[in-house]
């Protein structure tokens, strides 16, 4: 599993744009920037939709006032689901929605979880990271996917 002090692996996500899906790399997201990235088991899943994402959306201005350049959410979902989630949560202006549809990034950082028995397949553990210029400075991983305490916006604000 990735740890504080590690560089994020080179990876490519998909984001939704006005012109359709577009590839975006970790270099484009993190190089020279301070970024909070949080991972969720799935778009629209109860804890992710009602608790985890809304906290980062609602606290975005406070986080940015403390030196964060951007906030991104990553999930093992396709770009179309991630775009629908961005629209449904009114969070497009506050958060970048990164689709990791094949779980390549999630597997590379060692934060995948097999939720096949729940009908979800391979997904992401719930976490948040503070990343400076591609290097992990803070990492908060939840022990269970149904909670968003350690990895929530409030915890990240307290750590800044």
Image (cartoon, grey):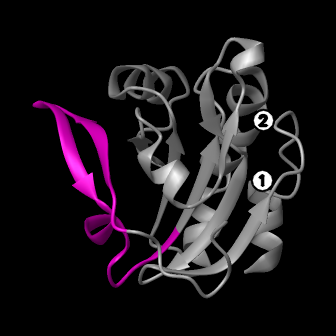
Callout 2 environment at 10 Å: few (<14), some (14 to 19), or many (20+)? some
Label drawn at residue 4? none
CB of mark 1 within 8 Å of CB of mark 2? yes
- Residue 94, magenta (yes or no): no
According to the picture, the residue beneath numbered tag 2 turns out to be 51
Looking at the rendering, the stretch of residues picked out in magenta corresponds to: 10-35
User: Residue 97, position in %: x, y?
Assistant: 43, 41
In the shown orientation, is residue 130 left or right of residue 94? right
At a point 83% along the width and 45% down the height, the residue shown is: 148
According to the picture, the residue beneath numbered tag 1 turns out to be 152
At a point 69% along the width and 19% down the height, the residue shown is: 116
- Residue 14, magenta (yes or no): yes
* Residue at the extreme top of the image, as rendered: 119
User: Residue 29, position in %: x, y?
Assistant: 34, 65
- Quadrant position of the C terminus in the picture: bottom right
- Quadrant position of the N terminus in the picture: bottom right
Q: Nearer the viewer, residue 36 or 77?
A: 77
Dividing the picture into quadrants, the one containing residue 30 is bottom left
Callout 1 environment at 10 Å: few (<14), some (14 to 19), or many (20+)? many
User: Residue 147, position in %: x, y?
Assistant: 88, 40
Question: Against 134, is 75 above or below?
Answer: above
CA gap, disc 1 to disc 2?
A: 8 Å
Dividing the picture into quadrants, the one containing residue 113 is top right
């Amino acid at each position: 599993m990735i740890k504080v002090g590690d560089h994020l692996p080179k990876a490519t996500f998909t984001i939704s744009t006005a012109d359709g899906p577009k590839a975006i790399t970790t270099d484009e997201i993190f190089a020279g920037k301070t970024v909070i990235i949080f991972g969720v088991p799935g778009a629209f899943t109860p804890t992710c939709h009602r608790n985890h994402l809304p906290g980062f959306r609602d606290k975005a201005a406070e986080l940015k006032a403390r030196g964060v350049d951007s906030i991104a959410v990553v999930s093992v979902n396709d770009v179309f689901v991630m775009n629908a989630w961005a629209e449904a949560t009114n969070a497009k202006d506050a958060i970048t929605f990164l689709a990791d549809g094949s779980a390549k990034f999630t597997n590379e950082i060692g934060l995948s979880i097999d939720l096949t028995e729940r009908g979800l397949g391979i997904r992401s553990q719930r976490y948040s990271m503070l990343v400076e210029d591609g290097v992990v400075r803070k990492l908060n991983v939840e022990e269970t996917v149904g909670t968003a305490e350690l990895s929530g916006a409030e915890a990240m604000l307290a750590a800044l």
